[in-house]
Amino acid sequence: MFSLTTKHLASLLIIASVVTSIGCNTRGDSSTKAAQEAIETSPTSVTLTHGVDESAGELSAYIVEIANATFYLEKQGGGLSSLLDADGIDWIGFNNAKGSGWKGEYRGFPNAVHKQDGSYFHAMNAGTDPSTSKVTIETPKHVQIVFTSGNGKWQAQWDFYPKRCDFTMTQVSAGYHYWVQYEGVPGGLMDESDFWYNSADNQPHPINESFKGDLPSPEWFAFGDEKSPRMFYLLHHEDDAFLNSNEQESKQFVDKQQEDSHPDDYVSRPYMTVLGFGRSNKEKFLNTPQRFSIGFVESTRYAAVDKAVKNLIAK
Ligand SMILES: [Ca+2]
Ligand SMILES: [Ca+2]
């Protein structure tokens, strides 16, 4: 999708007003701080409409607008088919054409259940099994949509707030595993000059460089494009179930248990990224309810991205 809504335009004008005079292509540009502040202080709400994602292949979608992003949540498959930034650029680029592979049908978020007890929570392609969905909360500050897999064994919850989106796998089919993936296109297209950051070090890495192993906590990844003033982040929240227990005496043990130690591999394919929390090669590792936040940070500085992502942890 490349259309600009009125709301996008408003966000865009706010951003443009603070970055125009300085330019927005330079990594480390301090003007991005002002842009991020503009986003953070702008009056925002969440709006849900029902429409069609034309670029995905005319699929029905929940269209959710927040401060600096528009999510197209494909209604039958239960995954994102498009994710527009404040400039109307789609960072996912899914389309359902069979055989399009990395150029379309494989793309999306979270693409979570793959050849386990079904294949679910992926924008509908030839291999996706259908789910049903229900809007369970709809207010100007919070939209919640729950998807249940066609076989009734998996459940996923989407929570949209004015400044972020949470995806939570709330029910896992017993005995099976999943992963949570970003298979998409930074800045609308995979370019050699695209880059990523993650929680393992504070350096930019070229998009074609792989990452293997377990990310340090808090686990996060962010993707950028040198032509874009922002980055797309994905945060894996720690499971805080143990924090509510009274077993303070075993806190040290509990802390160790909370530390997720599953691999979070990243590789680039031709034409798209493949980041998988709980993924190594073709293996899935997650088998308990887990929460993730995704969205855009209006900066390309490591420190700003790191701070913005860590600010989400407590929320
Ligand atoms: Ca790019
Ligand atoms: Ca991990």
Image (cartoon, rainbow, N blue to C red):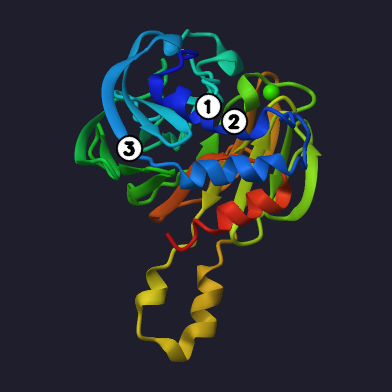
Q: Is residue 300 visible?
A: no
Residue 17 shows which numbered tag?
2
In terms of secondary structure, where does tag 2 sit? helix
In terms of secondary structure, where does tag 1 sit? helix
Q: Is residue 161 left or right of residue 49?
A: right
Q: Can you say whether 311 is above or below 160 in the image?
A: below
Q: Can you say whether 173 is above or below 128 in the image?
A: below
Q: Position of residue 48 (x, y in %)?
A: 28, 30
> Is the CB of mark 3 within 8 Å of ligand 1?
no
Q: Is residue 2 left or right of residue 154?
A: right
Check disc 3 and report the residue beneath it.
Answer: 46
Check disc 1 and report the residue beneath it.
Answer: 13
- In the current view of this chain or complex, which residue is farthest to the bottom? 249
* Mark 1 burial class by Cα count in 10 Å: few <14, some 14-19, many 20+: some
Q: Quadrant of residue 6?
A: top left
Mark 1: amino acid: Leu
- Residue sitting nearer the eye, 127 or 69: 69
* Mark 3 burial class by Cα count in 10 Å: few <14, some 14-19, many 20+: many
In terms of secondary structure, where does tag 3 sit? loop
- Residue sitting nearer the eye, 206 or 139: 139
Residue drawn 67% across the image and 40% down it: 32
Q: Position of residue 106 (x, y in %)?
A: 53, 21
Q: Can you say whether 143 is above or below 94 in the image?
A: below
Mark 3: amino acid: Val
Residue drawn 55% across the image and 20% down it: 89
* Mark 2 burial class by Cα count in 10 Å: few <14, some 14-19, many 20+: few
Residues at circles 2 and 1 in contact by the CB criterion of under 8 Å:
yes
Task: Point out the tag, 3 or 2, that comes first from the N-terminus.
Answer: 2
